[in-house]
Image (cartoon, coloured by chain):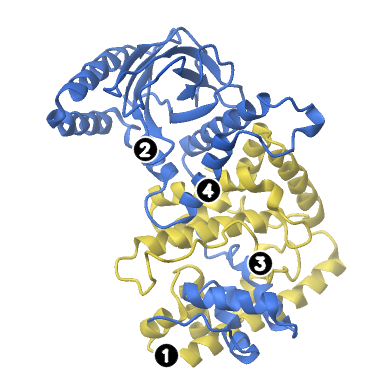
Chain colours: A blue, B yellow
Amino acid sequence: MTIQPSPLSHADALDLAPLYVLGALEDAEMAAVREHLATCPESHDEFEELGGVVPYLLESPDIEIVEPSAALGDRIMAAAAADLAERTAAERTTPATAAERTAPVPFPSADERTARAERTRNRPGPLAWIAAIAAVIAIAVLGVWNVRLQGQVNDLEQQATAAEQYRTAVTTVLDVAAQPGSQTALLAPQTTGGPRGIASVASDGSVQFAMQDLAPTSGSQVYETWAILPNSNPVPLGSFTVDASGVASFTSKQGPVGPGMAVAVSREPQAGATAPTEVVSVGVASTPAS
Amino acid sequence: MTDRDGGLSGRVASSTDDADRDVLARVSNGELDALQDLYDRYRTMAYSIALRITADASLAEDVVQDAFLGAWRNAARYVEGRGSVKTWLLSIVHHRAIDAVRRRRPTSELPEAEAPPPPALTLPDVWKEVAGNLDREAIAAALATLSVVQREAIELAYFGGLTQVEIADRTGAPLGTVKSRVRLGLLAMRAELTGEAADAGEADTQ
C-alpha cells in the first residue's frame, strides 16, 4: 500500500509513537513522523518516554551470548586500515599543516568516492563490503576456495583472450599458494564492477597477483600493490601497468608478512607512491585450513 | 570460552562511559588501535545482537563489520549527551541487522526499490536512556513486567524487523491493539527501570 507523504496531525504522530521508537513503521510513515517531530512545536514527551526504554532491549538476557569468529576482527581492522590509507594519502597531498588536518580533503575524487560508497552502503542491494566479506569467507577453507576458483575459471571461458590471460595468471598464483607458509587472499572490488582477483603471499613476503577488470593505464599511471598489516601503514610492493585486456599477472617485491594482513591494489598517477591514492581492490590473506 | 555473563553483566556506569568516549574520540581521530579497542569491548554484544536478529552467522558477521566500519568512518557524528557510546554503537548494529533481514525477506510489503536510505548512524533523538547503564537483572526484571502479548509485539518489531501492519497480520490482532500493546509494554518497562535506577543510585556500586 502507498502512504501519501501528507503531513501528520499531532494526534496521528502520537498514535504512531510506540511503533516509531521501535523502527516498526513503513518507510514513508517513519519519514512522516520524523518530519512531524522536526516541525511541530507541541510537546513530544511521549516519544522520549517510550523511546528511552528501547536501548535496553539490546541488553535483554534472552539474547544468547555468542562470540564472533576470530577472523572477523582481522577483516574489520584490515578494511579500516585500507580506508585509513586512502584518507592519509588524500591528506598528504594537501599543503595543510597538522593543525589543519581536519579541514575537508581537497581531493574531490577520493572524497566523492567515499561519499558514494557510504550512500551505496545504505541502499538496498548488494553492498561492496558484503561482497568482499562473502569472498573472504569463501576462501576460509582451501577446499571451498578451490571449488569457487574452478567455477570462476569456468565462467570465464567464453571470454577468450582476457580470460585465458587471467587463467594463466591464476595458475601462477596457485603455484605460490601451494607452497608451505603461504597465505592467499581474494581481492574484492571497492566499487561495483571494479577490479578483482586473487593473490598469494609467499613466506618470503613476495606477493603473486592475478587481477582482472582493471581499467587500462595510460601515460604515467600505474597500479601499485600494497601489504597492510593490522595497525601499520601500507607498505608499497611495486607497480604495474595494464593494457586493454584489463588483466594483470604481477610478482611483487618482498614485503612484510603477518597474521591478519591484507593486500591491496591502488591506482596511482605515477609510480613511486608511498601511500595509496585510490584503493581499487583489497582482500585479507588467510592460511588455508589443512 | 568466554564467561557466559562476561559481555553483558553490569558495569560501573560512569567510568565505562568515560573510557568509551575517550576510545571513540581516538577512533574519530583515525587511530586504528582505538578501533581495535572498541571492537574488543563490544564485539560479543554486537555479534550476539546481530545473530539474534538475522539468525545467520555469516550475515551477522557482515552486519557487525558494516557497523564497526560505519562507526570508524562516522565516529565524529556521535553526539554526547544523547546516549552512551555503547548505545550508539549497538543501535548501529541493530539498525543494520534489521536492514539486512528486511532486504532478505522475499515477500515484504516494504517498497524495496524506492525505500529511502535509513538514517543509520544517528541515534534516534527520542532515545534518551532512562537510567544509564543497568545490569542484566534490572533489565530482566523490567522485561518480566510485560504480558506475553506485549512482549511478543515488541520482539516481533524490534528483533523481527516487522512493521506494525505485519505484526497485526502475524498475530491476528487489530492494528490498534498492536499499537497499544507496544505502548503499554514500553511504559511498563520504563516504570520498572526508573524505579530500579533510583534503587541502584542509593546502593551506588554493586
Q: Nearer the viewer, mark 4 or mark 3?
A: 4
Q: Give the alpha-carbon distance from disc 4 to disc 3, as whole Å.
A: 38 Å
Chain letter for the residue marked with disc 3 in the picture: B
Q: Give the alpha-carbon distance from disc 2 to disc 4, as whole Å.
A: 23 Å
Residue B137 numbered mark, or none:
3
Q: Give the alpha-carbon distance from disc 3 to disc 2, as whole Å.
A: 37 Å
Going by the numbered disc 3, the residue's amino acid type is Glu
Residue B173 numbered mark, or none:
1
Q: Mark 2 and mark 4 in contact? Answer it, CB < 8 Å.
A: no
Going by the numbered disc 4, the residue's amino acid type is Glu
Residue at 39 percent across and 47 percent down: it is B58
x%, y% of residue B82?
Answer: 74, 63
Q: Residues within 10 Å of mark 1 (few under 14, many from 20)?
A: some
Q: Mark 3 and mark 1 in contact? Answer it, CB < 8 Å.
A: no
Q: Nearer the viewer, mark 2 or mark 4?
A: 4
The answer to whether residue A67 shows anywhere in this view is no
Going by the numbered disc 2, the residue's amino acid type is Ile
* Labels 1 and 2 share a subunit: no
Residue A118 numbered mark, or none:
4
